Image (cartoon, rainbow, N blue to C red):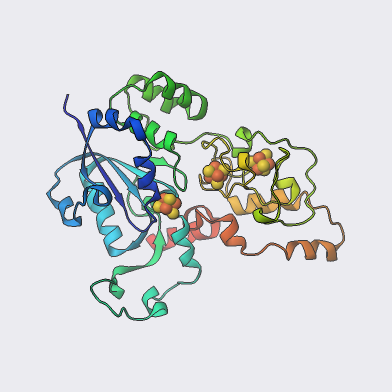
Amino acid sequence: MPKKKVAIYTATGCRSCETSILDIHYQVQRLNRMVDVVFWPYVLGSQLDDVDALDSIDVCFYAGAIRTETDRRMAEKLRDTSRHMVALGACAAFGGMPALANLSVTDSAPQEAIGEPTDPVAAPTPGEFEPHVKSLTQVVPADYVVPGCPPTQPLVWAAIQALVPEAGSDSHLAFAFSRLPKLVAEAMASGVLPPRGTIFGGDKAVCASCSRVKEEKRFKTVLRPYQKYEATGRCLLEQGLVCQGIATREGCGGLCTAEGIPCRGCFGKTEAVFDPGAKMVSAISSTFEPETPEEIQALTDQFIDLTGTFYRYAFPTQCALQRNRSIETQK
Ligand code: SF4
Ligand code: SF4
Ligand code: SF4
């Protein structure tokens, strides 16, 4: 059977999603048996125009947000050429941190804000910026999503195994059946592709896989992670650390919370949550310790940068107000 052709690309992003592919370590031999990587600028030095010579790609892993005309052109070209398009990481799936630029850029091109480029070769021309940063999924249809910032190595490897026809090893299947949706694990076991639209993450919230003990949720004060290292195993949120595990899709196994770091929501919201920011405001405010209006006001004043906190990874796609706006923009 011929090897599957794979393309890997990062648009506007930090390339750590691609690095998570490199993190497969010893699995690289199996990967080499399974696929031919035909386009990968970061590692193979492929030129962007090389994509025009590719007539078919089986699986494209596209990381990064759509910020420039080049990002959009590559997304459209790779979508046209690929049987399966995978949004790899929070930027491609939800907009990611680059999309927080939408907070300050509205109708004018960002170039007006940062000035003309002094070196027209090294810097993009003004026309190359899109008016708003978008996720890949807002620009072209994506068949699968691998969430995370960056996605964890086991998730990336699970996605590769599920999308190319080689059954996973026993250890990887054990991981998949314990952490991923049943359909994904079954795909890895059988070689049958998971249904289009599959998100390579869990169905529940991070809280479900967090080992921390929930006692009495009384929110007294807002703490930053550096202000309190929590080693006792008690729920971080009820101690004042803004942990978004309640609203965030599981799949990482509570990677951050296990180390005393609050979840920042990089897997995006769960299906059951309509708007992650609203969910967090509701969850936190319902457990406020202060009771008088003055005390409540003093506590709410401690929350700074609400948008950057609650929509850090998914501002254009999961904030209800932005979702409506992007639908209007597309009309
Ligand atoms: S999702 Fe995170 S790791 Fe991946 S490109 Fe975006 S910022 Fe980087
Ligand atoms: S809120 Fe955070 S620390 Fe508390 S149980 Fe949920 S994920 Fe764990
Ligand atoms: S705990 Fe939250 S922020 Fe950390 S990897 Fe998991 S989903 Fe991402």
Q: Image point 65% across, 44% down: which residue?
A: 260
* Apparent side of residue 270 relative to residue 148 in the rendered image (left or right): right
Q: Image point 83% across, 52% down: which residue?
A: 289
Quarter of the view holding residue 217: top right
Q: Is residue 99 above or below residue 155?
A: below
Which quadrant does the N terminus fall into?
top left
* Apparent side of residue 23 relative to residue 234 in the rendered image (left or right): left
Quarter of the view holding residue 27: top left
* Image location (x, y in percent) of residue 314: 50, 53
Residue 153 visible, this orientation: yes
Residue 269 visible, this orientation: no
Q: Nearer the viewer, residue 75 or 89?
A: 89
Q: Nearer the viewer, residue 257 or 329?
A: 257
Q: Is residue 26 above or below residue 308?
A: above
Q: Image point 77% across, 56% down: which residue?
A: 221
* Apparent side of residue 133 relative to residue 313 in the rendered image (left or right): left
* Image location (x, y in percent) of residue 147: 45, 43
Which quadrant does the C terminus fall into?
bottom left
* Image location (x, y in percent) of residue 77: 22, 52
Q: Image point 58% across, 40% down: which residue?
A: 272
Q: Nearer the viewer, residue 36 or 130?
A: 36
| Image quarter for ligand 2 | top right
Q: Nearer the viewer, residue 143 or 288?
A: 288
* Image location (x, y in percent) of residue 318: 51, 52
Furthest-right residue in this view? 292
* Apparent side of residue 210 relative to residue 20 in the rendered image (left or right): right
Q: Is residue 64 above or below residue 156?
A: below
